[in-house]
Amino acid sequence: MSLQAGDTAPAFTALDQNGNKVSLKDFKGKKVVLFSYPQDDSPTCTIQACNFRDNYAALTDKGIVVLGVSPDDEKSHKKFEAKFSLPFTMLADPTYKILDAYGVHGEKQMYGRKFIGIFRRTFLIDEKGVIAHIISGVRSKIHTDQILKAWGMK
């Protein structure tokens, strides 16, 4: 069964790009954007990450915490952060625990070829740890606008 708006967000703890442990419970009382993406430094993921970077103040000014998660490790995240001056936390999930819990790791199809991969999906988690919105039609170039509109902030 896949997650839906109104469900409690699955708890998690993972290492960030600096090797620090980060848990969802650390952000109780805050709005959280948890976005899954396939791979650091790939073209579409870079566009999405840079959209968050360029609009980071618009999110943080509204009290929103941004967390990215992919199967890449901390070292890969650190390089990605440094290369593009990314200001948000990136969670390393090489064992797919978070990605599986959020239902974003599974069979995909591209150009008629089937493979196992990561779905680009964003979960808007409210102050109580409940999923308020799920954005599955992520548009990387305008993703921050999608988030602010979904939360009625734009």
Image (spheres, grey):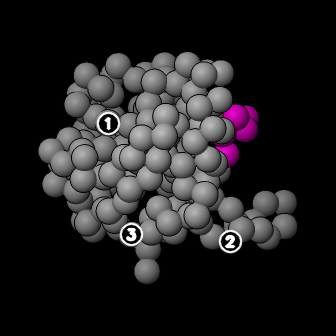
Q: Considering the image in quadrants, where does the N terminus appear?
A: bottom left
Prevailing secondary structure of the magenta residues: loop
Q: Position of residue 31 (x, y in %)?
A: 24, 42
Which residue appears at 39% of the width and 46% of the height? Answer: 21
> Is residue 49 shown left or right of residue 76?
left
| Labelled pair 2, 1 in contact (Cβ < 8 Å) | no
User: Where, by quadrant of the figure, is residue 130 drawn?
Assistant: bottom left
Whether residue 132 is visible to the viewer of this picture, yes or no, is: no
- Point out the tag, 3 or 2, that comes first from the N-terminus: 3
Tell me the kind of residue under disc 1. Val
Q: Position of residue 11 (x, y in %)?
A: 32, 62
Residue 95 within the magenta-colored segment of the rendering: no
User: Where, by quadrant of the figure, is residue 119 drawn?
Assistant: bottom right
**Mark 3 → mark 1, Cα distance in angstroms:** 20 Å
Tell me the kind of residue under disc 2. Glu
Tell me the kind of residue under disc 3. Leu
**Mark 3 → mark 2, Cα distance in angstroms:** 17 Å
Residue that carries the numbered disc 3 in the rendered image: 3
Q: Magenta residues?
A: 39-44
Characterize the local packing of mark 2: few (<14), some (14-19) or many (20 or more) Cα atoms within 10 angstroms. few
Residue that carries the numbered disc 1 in the rendered image: 65
**Mark 2 → mark 1, Cα distance in angstroms:** 29 Å
Q: Considering the image in quadrants, where does the C terminus appear?
A: top left
**SS label for mark 2:** strand
Residue 107 bears which disc, if any? 2
> Is residue 2 shown left or right of residue 126?
right
Q: Position of residue 111 (x, y in %)?
A: 84, 60
Characterize the local packing of mark 1: few (<14), some (14-19) or many (20 or more) Cα atoms within 10 angstroms. some
- Point out the tag, 2 or 1, that comes first from the N-terminus: 1
